[in-house]
Structures are given as structure tokens and as C-alpha cells.
Image: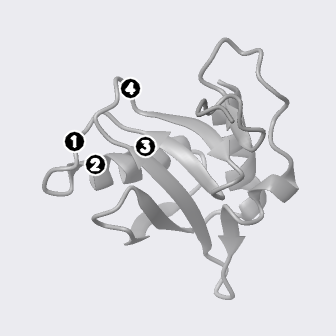
Amino acid sequence: MSNSRKADTHWIDRSADGCGPAAPSVEEWDEVLSEEPDGSLLLAIEVTPGSSRDAVVGLNTWRNTLQVAVCARPRKGAANKAVCDLLTAALVDTEATVALVKGEHSRRKRVRIEGASRVAVLNILSAALEG
């Protein structure tokens, strides 16, 4: 069994040369982006701090997380702020607000998105994955 992420059939990576698989289906997003009874959305993410760029990198359907890379180091909340800033910038066309609700000291986090529809967020994040 290979240790390579690209060999894992559950890994969807958009950071390569654009020759990757098709955009993730709505069903692949079901556990990653869930809608709460109050209308807000919860986004499960996994962060790679100290990266060379701030970007939405891929969708890991095995872990049910959106892979996000940020340049900031995990010091004094800098990486958490960078994640929220990245998502806010991606959702700038909506009137969404983004807040970290779980995982302050972990790579795996939950982010609450308020003020945007699930369809709009899915379209924006899918487009970010396609590059």
C-alpha cells in the first residue's frame, strides 16, 4: 500500500497541473459542508500552516475535510486568523461572515459561515479547487 496521497482514491487534489479528476460532486461535500438548523453552515477543514501560499488546496473525502494551506505559522492564533481571512476573501461576493468554532489548537477545525447559502459556498469553493 502506497503512502502517497495521490494514490489514495479518496483524495482530490487541485494543486497539480490541472489534470486532476473532475470537480467534487455535491455528495462529496455533504460531510464537509453541513447546514445547521439556524441556517448557518459548518465547514470542516484541515490546515497546513507554514505553507508557501494561502490557498484552498483540495478535498479529502476520506477525512471529510477541505484542505487549506496558509503561510502563517501556528503562533498566537496567526494561522487561525489566516484561515478565516482566506475564507472571507474567497466568499467576498457573498455577505458571509466566517468564524472559527472548533479546533483552535488543532490542524482539524470547524468554521461557521453565516450569511451565505450552501449552494453559493459550494460553487465558490469548487471554483477555488479548480484553480
Say if 28 sits above or below 129 in the image. Answer: below
Disc 3 versus disc 4: distance between alpha carbons? 11 Å
Disc 2 versus disc 1: distance between alpha carbons? 6 Å
Which residue in the protein does label 1 denote? Answer: 73
- The answer to which of 79 and 12 lies nearer the viewer is 12
Circles 2, 1 touching at the beta carbon (< 8 Å): yes
Which residue in the protein does label 4 denote? Answer: 53
Q: Secondary structure at mark 2?
A: helix
Which residue in the protein does label 3 denote? Answer: 86
Where residue 5 is drawn, which disc sits there? none
First in residue order: circle 2 vs circle 1: 1
First in residue order: circle 3 vs circle 4: 4
Q: Is residue 108 visible?
A: yes
Amino acid beneath label 1: Arg
Disc 3 versus disc 1: distance between alpha carbons? 14 Å
First in residue order: circle 4 vs circle 1: 4
Disc 4 versus disc 2: distance between alpha carbons? 12 Å
Report the number of numbered marks. Answer: 4
